[in-house]
Image: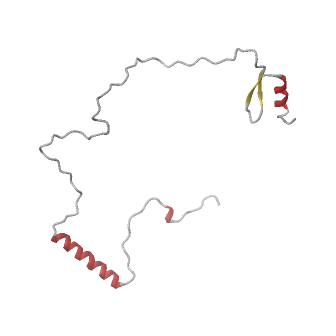
Amino acid sequence: MSFHLEGPWLSTTGKRKTKRKYRTAEQAKKARELSASWEELLKKHNVTKTKAKTTVSKNTPQTGPVYRGSDLPRIPSRETTWEPCTKAEIKVYTGTKMLGIATMHKSNSVPVFSDQEAKDISRMRRG
């Protein structure tokens, strides 16, 4: 059973509202009357269902949007020259204290500085 089907409640598409259903005919009639009276009230007060428009005064000059810090003085960015990115030099240990590198657990590389450390790592520090 690798392909399970989920019900329509899991869908992210088709979220349209369906026609409103009422329990009784009385409730449906009352809802229709209320919506009709609401529409009459809107017409009585000359209210239309449109998006609100912003009004701009003709006396004020139109400028762009005001952002935070836009009233501060303009500081130019730092001018830099273009330089190519080069590969960093490979880092190599040149000292004499480290004897080598041991693998302790799950490919974990550990530097070894003494013979006792090498013995401990080979026994996984069990004794």
Q: What x and y, as percent, mark residue 17?
A: 38, 67
Is 18 located above or below residue 98 in the figure?
Answer: below
Dividing the picture into quadrants, the one containing residue 76 is top left
The one nearer the camera, 2 or 30, is 30
The one nearer the camera, 31 or 21, is 31
The one nearer the camera, 71 or 89, is 71
Give the residue furthest to the left.
Answer: 59
Please tell me which residue is depicted at 44% across the width and 59% down the height of the picture: 13
Is 24 located above or below residue 94 in the figure?
Answer: below
Please tell me which residue is depicted at 30% across the width and 81% down the height of the picture: 30
Please tell me which residue is depicted at 23% across the width and 76% down the height of the picture: 36
The one nearer the camera, 59 or 49, is 59
Horizontally, residue 97 falls left or right of residue 20, namely right
Is 74 located above or below residue 58 in the figure?
Answer: above
Q: How is the image coloured?
A: secondary structure
* Figure quadrant of the N terminus: bottom right
Q: What x and y, as percent, mark residue 127?
A: 87, 35
Please tell me which residue is depicted at 64% across the width and 18% down the height of the picture: 91
Dividing the picture into quadrants, the one containing residue 117 is top right
Horizontally, residue 119 falls left or right of residue 2, namely right
Q: What x and y, as percent, mark residue 47?
A: 18, 65
Horizontally, residue 15 falls left or right of residue 110, namely left
Give the residue furthest to the front.
Answer: 72
* Count of labels in the image: 0
Is 122 located above or below residue 82 in the figure?
Answer: below
